[in-house]
Each structure stands twice: as structure tokens, then as C-alpha cells.
Amino acid sequence: MRLKVNGEIREIRDAATVGALLESLEVQPGRVAVEVNLTVVKKAEYGSFRLNDGDEVEIVNFVGGG
């Protein structure tokens, strides 16, 4: 499947859902926010939110600091 992830076109296998995408990218789901085609995906929906060829995905890491 071809996805645009954080501005970069990628061919990713087995990325049928947001959760599968995060797993394939080795990203911890609890520490990120995900947007697909300008829609924020709730963490509870990562495992069921379907991705389609050509989708644009933004993954934002939370960073703490003070």
C-alpha cells in the first residue's frame, strides 16, 4: 500500500489499519497522535481505523519538557 506518512511517500505492507501501520513503523501508539486525511484518529480506534491506498498520515510524537 502506498501512503504519504509525515510528508514522505512510503510503500508499506500489512498496514490495513492505523494500529498495523504504527506497529510496522515500530512506533509506540501510546505516545503519538495520528491524523489521516486531516482527521484526528482516536487512540481507541487505531486497531479498527482502515487505511486506503493514497491516504495521507501524520504521526506526531508527544515530547515532554520544562
Image (spheres, grey):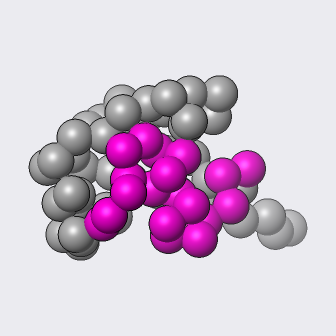
Is 61 above or below relative to 26?
above
On the image, the x and y values in percent for residue 6 come to 33, 64
For the point 21% across and 57% down, the residue is 1
On the image, the x and y values in percent for residue 52 come to 22, 40
For the point 63% across and 34% down, the residue is 43
On the image, the x and y values in percent for residue 56 come to 24, 49
Residue at the extreme right: 66
Residue range in magenta is 12-30
Q: Quadrant of the C terminus?
A: bottom right
Residue at the extreme left: 54
Instruction: Name the side, left or right, on which 55 lies relative to 21.
Output: left
**46 or 6, nearer to the observer:** 46
Instruction: Name the side, left or right, on which 7 lies relative to 47.
Output: left
Q: Is residue 8 visible?
A: yes
Q: In which quarter of the image is residue 28?
A: bottom right
For the point 60% across and 65% down, the residue is 27
**12 or 29, nearer to the observer:** 12
Is 22 above or below relative to 24?
above
Q: In which quarter of the image is residue 12?
A: bottom left
Is 19 above or below relative to 60?
above
